Image (cartoon, helix red, strand yellow):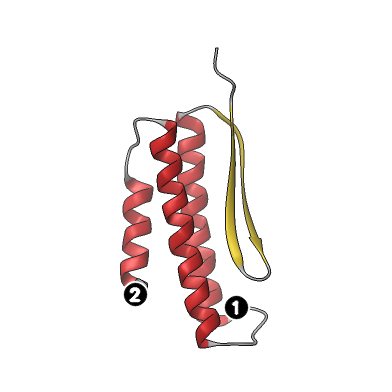
């Protein structure tokens, strides 16, 4: 599992990159989502039985989700996605859905 600085740096790199195809962009979004989920899992292991993430991790999770959303907005615009969503659910996990515009 990545350390906090490694995870943050990897998400930053994925968000800053330009993608040539919707598939490559979606793979990057999937990777960023997996990194966030790994960080959530690590936090759950550090604080078993906790049903919320307050304090430092809550703030950090919010920042990671903002980066993921910015990445999705950029990709959605570039590849004409009809919509996208980010879901955070309990037990804690993040998932992403993208709906693409039908091609000709």
Say few, some or many: other residues with alpha carbon within 10 Å of mark 2 (under 14 / 14 to 19 / 20 or more). few
Q: Could you tell me which secondary element the residue under label 1 belongs to? A: loop
Q: Percent x, y for residue 37? A: 51, 65
- Residue at 51% over, 35% down: 76
On-image quarter of the C terminus: top right
Query: Residue under circle 2?
Result: 3
Report whether 98 appears left or right of 30: right
Q: Is residue 68 above or below residue 72?
A: below
**Residue 69 against residue 20 in the figure, above or below:** below
Of residues 97 and 57, the one drawn nearer to the viewer in this rendering: 97
Residue ID at (67%, 80%): 51
- Please state if 12 lies on the left or on the right of 62 as rendered: left
Residue 31: % across, % down = 42, 53
Q: Which quarter of the figure has residue 52?
A: bottom right
Q: Which mark is residue 53?
A: 1
Say which residue appears at 59% left-offset and 87% top-offset.
48
Q: Decide: marks 2, 1 in contact (CB < 8 A)? A: no
Tell me where residue 2 sits by quadrant.
Answer: bottom left
**Farthest residue in the top direction?**
104
Q: Nearer the viewer, mark 2 or mark 1?
A: 2
Q: Which quadrant of the figure contains the N terminus?
A: bottom left
Q: Tell me the CA gap for discs 2 and 1.
A: 18 Å
Residue drawn where x is 43% and y is 62% of the image = 35
As helix, strand or loop, the secondary structure at mark 2 comes to loop
Q: Is residue 8 left or right of residue 81?
A: left
* Image x and y of residue 89, in percent: 67, 64
Circle 1 Cα neighbour tier, 10 Å, few/some/many (<14 / 14–19 / ≥20): some
């Amino acid at each position: 599992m990545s350390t906090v600085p490694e995870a943050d740096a990897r998400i930053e790199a994925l968000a800053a990159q330009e993608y040539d195809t919707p598939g490559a962009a979606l793979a990057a979004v999937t990777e960023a989502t997996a990194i966030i989920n790994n960080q959530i899992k690590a936090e759950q292991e550090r604080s078993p039985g906790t049903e919320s993430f307050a304090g430092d991790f809550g703030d950090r999770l919010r920042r990671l989700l903002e980066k993921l959303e910015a990445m999705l907005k950029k990709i959605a615009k570039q590849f004409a996605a009809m919509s996208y969503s980010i879901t955070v659910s309990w037990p804690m996990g993040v998932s992403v859905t993208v709906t693409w515009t039908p091609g000709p």
